[in-house]
Image (spheres, rainbow, N blue to C red):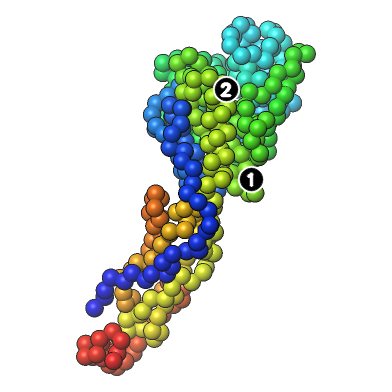
């Protein structure tokens, strides 16, 4: 008779000498999220799904649209776009384009990314969709397509509008998709200065100047939203993405961003636990031509966790056993369950690592009688 099996593989994994991690559960930001991009693990979040105003972090969505157009061949870096009077008159941060001139697309990209030029966003929006209003509709459609379900865009710059909203989780999704989808264009976000019309401006992202490995993305500020930042940094092949919003000053934004990024790199790590195809354990087989079948993991298992949680993690293979024959290689049989303090339980499927055939009719009858008389051990 099949029975529930808990195959304890590892009771306590390798002990580390690290002390308790510093806590990041207090932040002055109204909304925040920190994600390890290599595993998709959320290291910290606060009001991550609350509606908020993206301010100039909107420009990441504008750039996503531009990068997509470039990648599809509908736009080129050396093309020029006309500057309308609307773009020229646009207030706030500016690239200082001149009305009735044409500007290189690559200059406009730097004008948006480095200089946060509201005027440059309108030039790009009008050049791609015909009007900023049409472009904003396209932005919203694209945002929803990539999973930004809490976002609605009404303009290309982040200019205040009560219906122009997002969440910090959505902004993190946008940052991750930008990095993944457009590696050839993402390096623009790491540039610290750009000069246009003899006016040099510096990138407002504070982490570019203070945090090792920081290479993007975008700041934002309005009276309604407060100060915000979407940032990313990579160290030793591991990338973190941070979004904070609703901070009271630019100085505090810089401090909080650096603190959270450093905390994420210092207190967490990505642990490669198992390789694809590796046998995790063996399961007993019922009436098969083999007594056991290997349980195999199909993909590499890499998990981000704190060093404290790593020290106390337990791993179990859970399945109904013995497994009745015949068994086809690749058939899902068990679930690998990983648990640790202050970590969501991770469940990963395990599959049969080999084919197992049935015993002959005579052998099955003998095995069944033996099981009924002597139990599963046969003695």
Residue 71 vertical placement versus 122 (above, below): below
Q: Is residue 102 visible?
A: yes
Of circles 2 and 1, which is in front?
Answer: 2
Sort mark 2 into few (<14), some (14-19) or many (20+) by Cα contacts within 10 Å.
Answer: few
Residue situated furthest left in the rendering: 373
C-alpha gap between disc 2 and disc 1 = 24 Å
Q: Quarter holding the N terminus?
A: bottom left
Which residue is depicted at the point 29% across and 90% down?
378
Task: Say what secondary structure mark 1 lies in.
Answer: strand
Q: Which residue is mark 1?
A: 235
Q: Is label 2 in a helix, a strand or a loop?
A: helix
Q: Quadrant of residue 93?
A: top right
Instruction: Give coordinates of residue 354: x percent, y percent.
Output: 46, 76
Closer to the N terminus: mark 2 or mark 1? Answer: 1
- In the picture of the structure, the residue carrying the numbered disc 2 is 251
Q: Residue 226 got which mark?
A: none
Mark 1 Cα shell of 10 Å, populated few (<14), some (14-19), many (≥20):
few
Q: Mark 2 near mark 1, Cβ–Cβ under 8 Å?
A: no
């Amino acid at each position: 008779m099949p029975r529930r099996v808990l195959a304890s593989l590892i009771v306590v994994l390798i002990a580390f000498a690290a002390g308790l991690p510093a806590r990041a559960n207090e932040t002055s930001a109204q909304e925040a999220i920190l994600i390890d991009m290599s595993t998709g693990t959320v290291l910290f979040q606060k009001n991550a799904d609350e509606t908020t105003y993206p301010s100039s972090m909107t420009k990441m969505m504008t750039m996503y649209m531009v990068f997509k157009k470039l990648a599809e061949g509908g736009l080129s870096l050396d093309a020029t776009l006309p500057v309308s009077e609307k773009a020229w008159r646009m207030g706030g941060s500016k690239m200082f384009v001149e009305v009735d001139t044409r500007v290189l697309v690559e200059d406009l990209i730097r004008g948006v990314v480095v200089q946060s030029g509201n005027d440059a966003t309108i030039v790009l929006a009008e050049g791609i969709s015909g009007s900023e209003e049409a472009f904003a509709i396209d932005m919203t459609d694209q945002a929803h397509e990539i999973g930004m379900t809490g976002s609605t865009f009404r303009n290309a710059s982040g200019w205040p509008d009560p219906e122009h909203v997002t969440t910090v989780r959505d902004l993190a999704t946008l940052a991750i998709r930008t990095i993944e989808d457009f590696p050839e264009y993402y390096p623009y976000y790491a540039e610290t200065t750009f000069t246009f019309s003899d006016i040099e401006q510096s990138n407002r992202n504070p982490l570019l100047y203070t945090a090792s490995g920081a290479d993007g993305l975008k700041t934002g500020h309005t009276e309604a939203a407060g100060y915000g930042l979407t940032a990313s940094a990579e160290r030793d092949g591991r990338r973190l993405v941070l979004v904070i919003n609703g901070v009271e000053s630019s100085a505090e934004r810089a401090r909080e961003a650096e603190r959270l990024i450093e905390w994420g790199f210092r207190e967490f790590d990505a642990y490669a636990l198992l390789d694809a195809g590796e046998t995790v354990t063996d399961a007993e087989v019922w009436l098969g031509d083999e007594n056991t079948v290997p349980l195999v993991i199909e993909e590499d298992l890499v998990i981000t966790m704190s060093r404290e949680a790593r020290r106390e993690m337990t791993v179990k293979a859970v399945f109904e056993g013995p497994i009745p024959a015949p068994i086809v290689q690749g058939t899902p049989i068990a679930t690998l369950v990983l648990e640790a303090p202050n970590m969501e339980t991770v469940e990963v499927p395990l599959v049969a690592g080999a084919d197992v055939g049935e015993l002959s009719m005579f052998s099955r009858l003998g095995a069944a009688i033996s099981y009924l008389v002597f139990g599963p051990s046969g003695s």
